[in-house]
Image: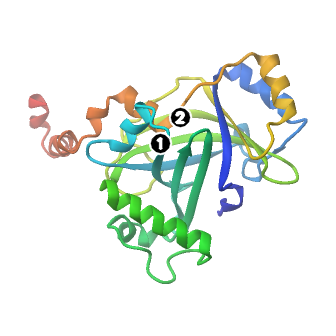
Amino acid sequence: MSQDHHIQAQRFELKYIVSEETALRIRDFISAYLDLDDYGVGKPHNSYPVHSLYLDSDRMRIYWETVNGNKNRYKLRLRFYHDDPEAPVFFEIKRRENDAILKQRAAVRRDAVDWVLRGHLPPAGYLISNDAKSLGAMQRFSELLKHVDATPKAHIAYLREAWVHPDNNSVRVTMDREVRCAVETTARLVAEMDKPVTVFGKSVVLEVKFTGRFPKWFGEMTRVFGFKQCSAAKYVDGVTLMGDQQFHPGLVRQRKMAALDPAIQAYL
């Protein structure tokens, strides 16, 4: 399942936290302007699962740059949509520069993931597309990975309902439900999560993404529903909720030891 055509190189992104009741009303409103994403058609609640493995340094440098509000910051993640070993994994850089969001993304075969996470570029034939955009994204990902010495830290998963402009990708509205976060220090890339926590409770994360002009109808939607913009950063909010110390290598090693010998749990 390739969803690469939905990705814009640069866009503006506004986020809101809304109730499920409000989300259903928003669905009715935006259906007059946007079409349901193909991947949600025929699915329960118009949604499909999204999984992301976030990478960070042992000192959680990327996390803290967001918490501290650094203007030009980025996140490194591996995105996948299901457990199919034949499905590609998308290596993504999501960068914020002032008010704009820039995303670089490259699809890689799963059997090359460990090789890439060790700091190498995918071997010939393991990059799904060899176009200049994918090659540039992969090279930049590798540079940033080595720059911060990033390794897998957290698995973020949710169900996404997406609506898109019928003619192009200039406007995209998503509603993410059941956002969960779990410690994950390996690149096993499976949908199953180990002791996940729910990040936003029963609330829905609404995101409006657009390139170019601000959609006129969105101003009306904001007035009608009266919601207020917020950050709603899934990785950062998930780590904050669990406590960033939960993702430190020493504590992770202790957990692994305790899993092997339950008697050790008494000393943790």
Disc 1 residue crowd, few under 14, some 14–19, many 20+, Cα 10 Å: many
Residue placed most toward the observer, 148 or 166: 148
Residue 145: % across, % down: 37, 59
Secondary element under disc 1, as helix, strand or loop, is strand
Give the CA distance from mark 2 to mark 1: 7 Å
* In the rendered image, the vertical position of residue 77 relative to residue 267, given as above or below: below
Q: Residue at x 71, y 55 (%)?
A: 6
Q: Residue at x 47, y 47 (%)?
A: 74
Residue placed most toward the observer, 138 or 159: 138
Residue 131: % across, % down: 62, 76
Disc 2 residue crowd, few under 14, some 14–19, many 20+, Cα 10 Å: many
Question: Circles 2 and 1: CB distance less than 8 Å?
Answer: yes
Dividing the image into 4 quarters, which one contains the N terminus?
bottom right
- Look at the image and name its color scheme: rainbow
Going from N to C along the chain, the mark reached first, 2 or 1, is 1
Amino acid type, mark 2: Val
| Horizontal side of residue 68 vs 1, given as left or right | left
Secondary element under disc 2, as helix, strand or loop, is strand
Q: Residue at x 14, y 37 (%)?
A: 262
The residue indicated by pointer 1 is 156
Q: Quadrant of residue 81?
A: bottom right
Q: Residue at x 57, y 74 (%)?
A: 128
Dividing the image into 4 quarters, which one contains the C terminus?
top left
Residue 191: % across, % down: 48, 50
Q: Quadrant of residue 147?
A: bottom left
Q: Quadrant of residue 19?
A: top right
Amino acid type, mark 1: Ile
Label number found at residue 58: none
The residue indicated by pointer 2 is 179
